[in-house]
């Protein structure tokens, strides 16, 4: 089974969420390596993560999976669509 976790947020979505009064309980942020190469994007990421760190506890996907295992929706995952090469 696949566990349905909250959707990911792009860098722009993360920046907007960080200053929003309606910050979601869980925010899964992703960014690309080139975001770190552009100074303005790197500063935006650092500022957003610092603000989020003051507003929410830091976690990882394994902790989130464990915390939501009893309540998150589950979806069947056929064996034929398992790991590559499997």
Image (cartoon, rainbow, N blue to C red):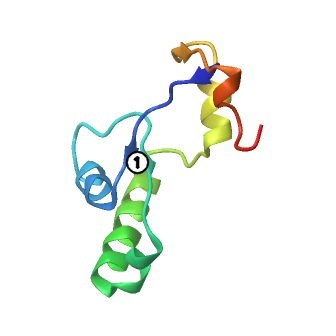
Mark 1 burial class by Cα count in 10 Å: few <14, some 14-19, many 20+:
few
Compared to 78, does 43 lie above or below?
A: below
Placement of 72 over or under 38, stated as above or below: above
Q: Nearer the viewer, residue 57 or 66?
A: 66
Extreme residue in the right direction:
86
Give the image quarter of residue 75: top right
Query: Residue at image x 41%, y 85%?
Result: 37
Q: Please state the horizontal and vertical placement of residue 70, each as a whole percent of the image.
A: 62, 13
Q: Judge from the rendering whether residue 23 lies leftward or rightward of residue 29; answer left or right.
A: left
Left or right: residue 73 versus residue 24 is right
Residue 7 image position (x, y, % from top left): 40, 37
Q: Position of residue 59 (x, y in %)?
A: 59, 45
The kind of secondary structure element at disc 1 is helix
Q: In the picture, residue 38 is in which quadrant?
A: bottom left
Q: Is residue 78 left or right of residue 22?
A: right
Q: Position of residue 21 (x, y in %)?
A: 22, 41
Residue at x 53% of width, y 18% of height: 72
- Classify the position of the N terminus by image quarter: top right
In the depicted view, which residue is nearer to us: 70 or 73? 73
Mark 1 = which residue? 55
């Amino acid at each position: 089974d696949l566990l349905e976790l909250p959707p990911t947020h792009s860098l722009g979505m993360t920046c907007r969420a960080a200053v929003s009064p309606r910050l979601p309980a869980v925010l899964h942020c992703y960014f690309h390596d080139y975001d770190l190469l552009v100074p303005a994007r790197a500063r935006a990421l650092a500022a957003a993560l610092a603000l989020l760190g003051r507003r929410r506890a830091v976690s990882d996907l394994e902790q989130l999976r464990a915390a939501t295992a009893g309540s998150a929706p589950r979806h069947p995952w056929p064996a034929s669509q398992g790991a590559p090469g499997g």
